[in-house]
Image (tube, helix red, strand yellow):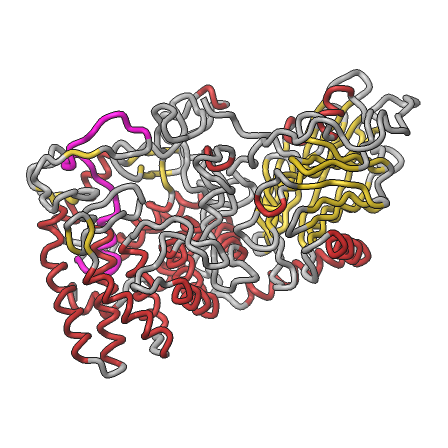
């Protein structure tokens, strides 16, 4: 059984002591801390309640919030978590120990247009309020902290910091420089300061001599180690805040390429002050929101708030050192956070996926941020491989990470180029290479549109969703080529697109499957023969092979949204009935759907973490499918149903207005705190694809039709 979510450590620690209790003022031992190299606890849970950064390129730092403090901070890019956590702990004179993550904590967005958050935690006789922003002028996270004693007893307040510089953390060194806690490795550094300044500090090894280990064991800080490392380091600093006479402090965590730079960054931010940094932070985000299309068609205030939160989340997901590189999620769910075999560095969600980037770009384009979509396309062409395909995913710096070929990820950049009307030389070079790759690709003896992986990434075959994207990509490529005078190539690609459009049902729609006597689309076929009982294993810990005719998913709707099939196509309509019966569930948050039959990408039955090879797991419900269904219903002349889908998506937002990858289904485990169906599970939250789908459904409802559909494809096949 995998370890459960680790409680946040990068945070604030509050220790309550009875009045008059003497506090230690000298170190229990001098010199380096014992317990090297320390334990590696992995990263924080993926169910984030907040995600923020400034709009400024001068501040390449991002924070996320867990249930009780900052958890996973990124610097200098969004592929590199540089700190694990920021956390509050309270200890009273009677002996109890409480962290922010141990007590009820609520997260309140400052306002929906600004990714700044206030967290209020209430323990036994105390309350802590922490507000988070980043300094737009430099890479610093700034926390305004209020600690209040509710029973009049004085408190001790400590701050814990756990660095993971350069993703790893195993080679970090921590030390005290004056009143600053400094951490560094070979390529980066951090500096944690406080105003008023720390009065005690220590750096130790996690699980042995770090501050939390000391405080939790002894209910006071007994050791003041001046340095520790290399290894997994935890740092602690005491604030002169007792919650009675003094209740306020500002924490600044600055980053740099080396210690001197990090310290200077933190000092400069500290001099600026929290109020000035927060004001500039908010002004930057409000200027951005004012440049976008407002959701005037919405009357529900919660749905409006989720729209603005979604545009902010999407914009915040762009790397500042590599424009156009938008990551999938600032999180590491399940085994990706603590299993080095699954994720030797940190995890695949804070990578750039061409498919997800297409969702990003089309959503922001529809919301009025054309420049972001242009940057996304430029980034895609910059990582295109010599043979014309786009990598499965890349670091934000552009290096390919995983290397499987997914044809939709090569087709979507071409569709985006058409949506932007781009015919510049660099774009047309990318379009030509991509189109050539699409028609010439072959895998396992099968020619395209057979793909090495479909959009769920664990199977090869003929996928209706993937085929839809390749048809759309070729038609869009042909139109762009015609505009630039290449009539011969355009006609070649149109001929292939027409052939695939005529054959897609024969490859992927079964007429003798168990779910209906009428034809319906399958998730995929391994052999292009949907009436053949070919078997394969669905993956993600499902214990048996399955007949391909039993496996369905909602991806066939790509055929409609991308203009290849009409919404009233009989196979489409029947397939909707099938997936509603096989994959759909009603929850308090409305109707939602599983990815595909027998999906195992989710927690175990008892709520324990997903991992490969460690027992059966169960995929839950994906809110983004409600958005895709809503786009289909707009095309089918059912705007009321589309509005219902938007309500269902908005209902899955957490208290920080972030949308998840998955929500609990009706098999939610009671052992996991009795979670309610329709509420976020521990999958990647926020997921950019979900936010993008939400934004695009809002703008599509205002337009009366899906804004994503390329008219050149629809004109050819459905109008």
* The N terminus lies in quadrant: top left
| Outermost bottom residue | 485
Q: Is residue 424 visible?
A: yes
**49 left or right of 419 in image:** right
Count of numbered circles in the view: 0
**68 left or right of 631 in image:** right
Residue depicted at x 43% and y 69%: 374
Residue 83 counted in the magenta span? no
Residue depicted at x 51% and y 25%: 3
The x, y position of residue 574, in whole percent, is: 15, 44
* The C terminus lies in quadrant: bottom left
Residue 149 sits above or below residue 437 on the image: above
Q: Is residue 705 visible?
A: no
Residue 542 counted in the magenta span? yes
Closest to the observer: 300 or 233?
A: 233
What's the magenta region?
541-565
Residue 335 sits above or below residue 395 on the image: above
Residue depicted at x 52% and y 26%: 4
């Amino acid at each position: 059984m995998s370890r459960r979510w680790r409680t946040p450590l990068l945070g604030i620690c509050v220790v309550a002591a009875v009045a008059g209790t003497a506090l230690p003022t000298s170190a229990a031992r001098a010199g380096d801390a014992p317990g090297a190299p320390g334990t590696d606890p992995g990263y924080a849970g993926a169910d984030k309640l907040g995600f923020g950064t400034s709009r400024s390129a001068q501040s390449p730092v991002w924070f996320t919030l867990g249930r009780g403090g900052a958890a996973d901070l990124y610097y200098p890019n969004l592929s590199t978590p540089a700190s694990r956590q920021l956390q509050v702990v309270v200890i009273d004179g009677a002996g109890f120990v409480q962290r922010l993550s141990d007590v009820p904590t609520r997260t309140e967005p400052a306002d929906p247009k600004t990714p700044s958050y206030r967290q209020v935690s209430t323990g036994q006789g105390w309350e802590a309020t922490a507000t988070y922003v980043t300094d737009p002028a430099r890479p610093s996270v700034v926390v305004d902290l209020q600690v209040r004693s509710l029973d009049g007893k004085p408190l001790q307040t400590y701050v814990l910091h756990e660095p993971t510089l350069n993703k790893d953390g195993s080679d970090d060194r921590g030390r005290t420089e004056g009143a600053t806690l400094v951490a560094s490795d070979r390529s980066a550094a951090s500096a944690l300061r406080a105003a008023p300044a720390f009065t005690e500090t220590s750096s130790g090894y996690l699980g042995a001599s770090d501050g939390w280990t000391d405080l939790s064991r002894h209910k006071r800080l007994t050791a003041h180690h001046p340095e520790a490392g290399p290894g997994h380091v935890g740092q602690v600093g005491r604030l002169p805040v007792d919650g009675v006479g003094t209740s306020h402090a500002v924490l600044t965590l600055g980053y740099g390429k080396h210690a001197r730079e990090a310290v200077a960054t933190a000092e400069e931010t500290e001099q600026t002050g929290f109020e000035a940094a927060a004001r500039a932070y908010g002004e930057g985000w409000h200027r951005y929101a004012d440049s976008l299309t407002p959701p005037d068609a919405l009357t529900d205030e919660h749905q409006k708030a989720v729209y603005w939160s979604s545009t902010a989340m999407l914009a915040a997901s762009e790397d500042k050192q590599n424009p156009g590189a938008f990551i999938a999620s600032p999180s590491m769910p399940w085994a990706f956070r603590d299993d080095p075999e699954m994720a030797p560095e940190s995890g695949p969600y804070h990578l750039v996926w061409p498919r997800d980037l297409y969702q990003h770009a089309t959503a922001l384009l529809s919301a009025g941020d054309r420049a972001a979509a242009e940057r996304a396309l430029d980034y895609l062409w910059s990582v295109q491989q010599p043979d014309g395909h786009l990598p499965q995913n890349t670091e934000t710096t552009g290096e390919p990470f995983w290397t499987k070929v997914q044809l939709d990820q090569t087709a979507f950049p071409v569709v985006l180029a058409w949506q932007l009307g781009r015919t510049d030389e660099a774009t047309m070079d990318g379009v030509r290479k991509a189109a050539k790759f699409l028609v010439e690709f072959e895998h396992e003896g099968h020619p395209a549109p057979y793909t090495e992986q479909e959009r769920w990434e664990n199977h090869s075959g003929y996928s209706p969703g993937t085929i839809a994207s390749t048809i759309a990509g070729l038609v869009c490529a042909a139109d762009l080529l015609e505009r630039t005078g290449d009539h011969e190539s355009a006609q070649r690609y149109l001929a292939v697109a027409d052939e695939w459009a005529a054959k897609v049902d024969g490859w992927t729609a079964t007429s003798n499957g168990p779910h209906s006597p009428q034809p319906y689309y399958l998730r995929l076929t391994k052999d292009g023969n949907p009436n053949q009982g070919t078997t394969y294993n669905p993956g993600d810990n499902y214990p048996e092979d399955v007949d391909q005719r039993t496996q369905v998913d909602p991806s066939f709707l790509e055929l409609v949204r991308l203009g290849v099939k009409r919404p009233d196509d009989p196979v489409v309509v029947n397939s909707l009935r099938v997936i509603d019966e096989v994959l759909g569930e009603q929850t308090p948050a409305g109707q939602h759907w599983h990815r595909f039959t027998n999906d195992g990408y989710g927690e175990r039955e008892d709520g324990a973490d997903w991992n490969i090879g460690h027992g059966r797991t169960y995929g839950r419900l994906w809110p983004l499918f409600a958005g895709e269904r809503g786009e289909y219903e707009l095309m089918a002349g059912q705007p009321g149903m589309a509005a219902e889908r938007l309500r269902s998506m908005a209902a899955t937002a957490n208290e920080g207005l972030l949308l998840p990858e998955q929500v609990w289904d009706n098999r939610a485990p009671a052992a996991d705190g009795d979670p309610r169906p329709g509420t976020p599970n521990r999958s990647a939250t926020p997921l950019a694809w979900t936010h993008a789908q939400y934004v695009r459904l809002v703008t599509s409802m205002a337009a009366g039709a899906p804004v994503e559909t390329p008219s050149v494809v629809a004109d050819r096949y459905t109008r």
